[in-house]
Amino acid sequence: MRNTIARTQILDLITNSKTALSHAEIEQLLDGLCNRVTIYRVLDRLIDDKLVHKIINVDGSLKFAACRNCSDHHHDSHIHFSCLNCGSVTCLESVEPVFKIPRKYKVQEVNFTVSGLCPDCT
Amino acid sequence: MRNTIARTQILDLITNSKTALSHAEIEQLLDGLCNRVTIYRVLDRLIDDKLVHKIINVDGSLKFAACRNCSDHHHDSHIHFSCLNCGSVTCLESVEPVFKIPRKYKVQEVNFTVSGLCPDCT
DNA sequence: CATATTAATGCAACTATATTGCATTTGTAA
DNA sequence: TTACAAATGCAATATAGTTGCATTAATATG
Ligand SMILES: [Mn+2]
Ligand SMILES: [Mn+2]
Ligand SMILES: [Zn+2]
Ligand SMILES: [Zn+2]
């Protein structure tokens, strides 16, 4: 795992962003720093390294956000809020929903997304 | 809204399926009954008509399942279980998660997916 | 510092999935 | 039975992500 310019920049962007970023947004922010294929590959690596987690939006689009306390395995069971107006996706780190599903299902991962209007768009 | 053969067949397939179906699965089951573009359009209409709801899977793929009690508006705030082994997606109609997010967010829709192993794959 | 090793990158081609425009077909109301 | 618009088929197009391979560059080692 090498500390390349692309990796550093992309991780910086994601870490410093208040909201989750899409591949397209990252590409635009990088402004030609690297090829779009490299962005895909760097994102994959950052996820493997537990530095970033992937969010599947309500419209099926993907967003990426920084991980907190995911050193050995991803545990982003928090809710993601997706604004239907501005398209922003925010990690609500402190909100973990409570649910109970039949014992016969073995739960491994969780993806909770709530959509509506964010504070800026209300 | 006309009652065409394609519409009837696709709705039948979805209604009678224990698990949610993807576009590809529907296409295969229909075995050439209609063009794949028609399947996309019929699915859109069925969703508009509140007869079917769309599920965004953990891998970003789409699945379609029959609605229950969604005559005037969709209210599928139940959990969906996505099996990482066989790929099946099941509506857990009775499971509605409890969560509380800051008042400044206006919630409209909800998409909860839990992944792991389904009863058949345990 | 110089060099060797191989991870990472760029590029082009390819794949998979979904959408659009338009001519034709078909369901249904009159 | 006819007229009209909804629905369909088909081809073209769009969008997103993947792959193979030659080249570049990060880092470990002497
Ligand atoms: Mn998150
Ligand atoms: Mn459902
Ligand atoms: Zn917003
Ligand atoms: Zn299964």
Image: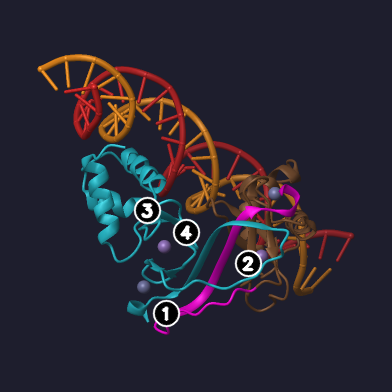
Chain colours: A brown, B cyan, C red, D orange
In the rendered view, would you say A45 is above or below B99? above
Q: Which tag, 3 or 4, sits closer to the chain's start?
A: 3
Disc number placed over residue A105 in the picture, else none: 1
Which chain contains the residue that carries disc 3? B
- Label 4 neighbourhood size at 10 Å, few (<14), some (14-19), many (20+)? some
- Label 2 SS: strand
In the rendered view, would you say A85 is above or below C24? below
Kindly identify the residue that appears in the image at 38 percent across and 59 percent down.
B69
C-alpha gap between disc 3 and disc 4? 11 Å
Q: Position of residue B74 (x, y in %)?
A: 45, 54
Disc number placed over residue A79 in the picture, else none: 2
Residue type at mark 1 is Tyr
Both marks 1 and 2 on one chain: yes
Which chain contains the residue that carries disc 4? B
Disc number placed over residue B75 in the picture, else none: 4
Residue type at mark 4 is His
Quarter assignment of residue C26: top left
Query: In this view of the protein, which residue sits in the foreground, A74 or D7?
Result: D7
Q: Is residue A20 magenta?
A: no
Q: Is residue A121 magenta?
A: yes
